[in-house]
Amino acid sequence: MELRHLHVVLTVAEAGSISRAASSLKIAQAGLTAQLRRIERGFGGPLFLRRSDGVELTELGRHVVLRSRDLVERFDDLLVTAHKMAAGSGSPGIRLGGVAGSLTPLLVGVVRGLLPNQPQTTHIERSCDAVLELVRAGKLDLALVVEFPQSPLRIPEEVDCRSVVAEPMLVGIAAGHRLSARSEIRLSELADEDWAVPEENYGGGRLNLHLACEAAGFTPRCVHFGVDPASAAELVRSAHTVACFFPTGQELPGVVLKPIVGSPLHRRVTLVWQRGCAAAEYVEDIHAALLRAYHEQVRCQARKLTATGFTAAAS
């Protein structure tokens, strides 16, 4: 006895006639009659009384139909839930990534807006090389990496990329700093300042700062190492320290952001994905939405800084 035999019994019972059931099942009436006899033998007795106008359930038939409905409904429910679980475990959704301090939160918001029904996860790594390796290995679908002019990234062959924006570095100084009233600052004017710098493996930012400062005629006096933007802002507020920030960073009360003359420091933000991955079909829309979201965030940040009397280079 198999599940398909229960479907036959239920169809005959619901139709009330072997001929109507045969039509519903799309089989010949004689074939259904022969199949029904085999099913009844399997249950040990007749399930239906044959009459000239159709069939009527026997007591055994009523018992079998009642229990069969329960079994079939449970089995159908099993199929539905099993498929849902398989789909959930087999497809992790969109896996996003980036490095700390990058525009990854912006990417997360853009993907959520474009694909609201897709589950997504985010992985923040310490270096862009680690992010690129995860994308190459198929462990991330989309990610943002950053690179500086003197420290170009090596994009793996399996990874496609598309530039998002070249983002200028701004110098952060305390609100009462001697240069706080200036609209922009020459890098050489910061030769006597203490600097707070990020960790070495963050995209080459520290190396590029050194190179830019040396081109301006001095070696930066780096005294605070491995700091994140929040820690750098605290040091700028509380000590004779300067640090570099980006126009899309968090709000920094007490810190004035100034553009550097000639913009000698900038980073390039790049969207990367594994060639041929399922998320590749969304790249065009995500890239366009990311650009819009970036420029809107820069404008919003500039308005906030202007409203508080600070200066930002948002362009």
Image (cartoon, helix red, strand yellow):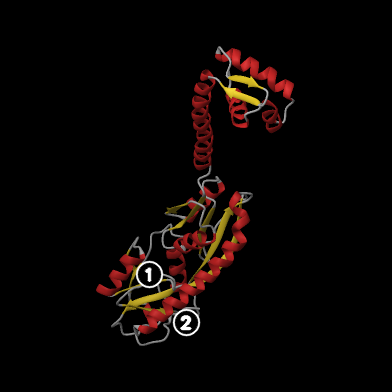
Asked if residue 223 can be seen in this view, the reply is no
Q: Earlier in the sequence, mark 1 or mark 2?
A: 1
Q: Secondary structure at mark 2?
A: loop
Residue most toward the left? 238
Report which residue position mark 1 lands on.
250
**Point 45% across, 64% down: residue:** 205
Report which residue position mark 2 lands on.
261
Q: Which amino acid, mark 2?
A: Val
In this rendering, the count of numbered labels is 2
In the image, taking residue 238 as reference, residue 72 lies left or right, namely right
Asked if residue 221 can be seen in this view, the reply is yes
The answer to which image quadrant residue 15 occupies is: top right
Note whether 256 is above or below 282 in the view shown.
Answer: below
Residue most toward the front? 52
In the image, taking residue 190 as reference, residue 151 lies left or right, namely right
Q: Position of residue 198 (x, y in %)?
A: 38, 63
Q: Position of residue 89 (x, y in %)?
A: 49, 40
Report the front residue among 238 and 71: 71
Q: Secondary structure at mark 1?
A: loop
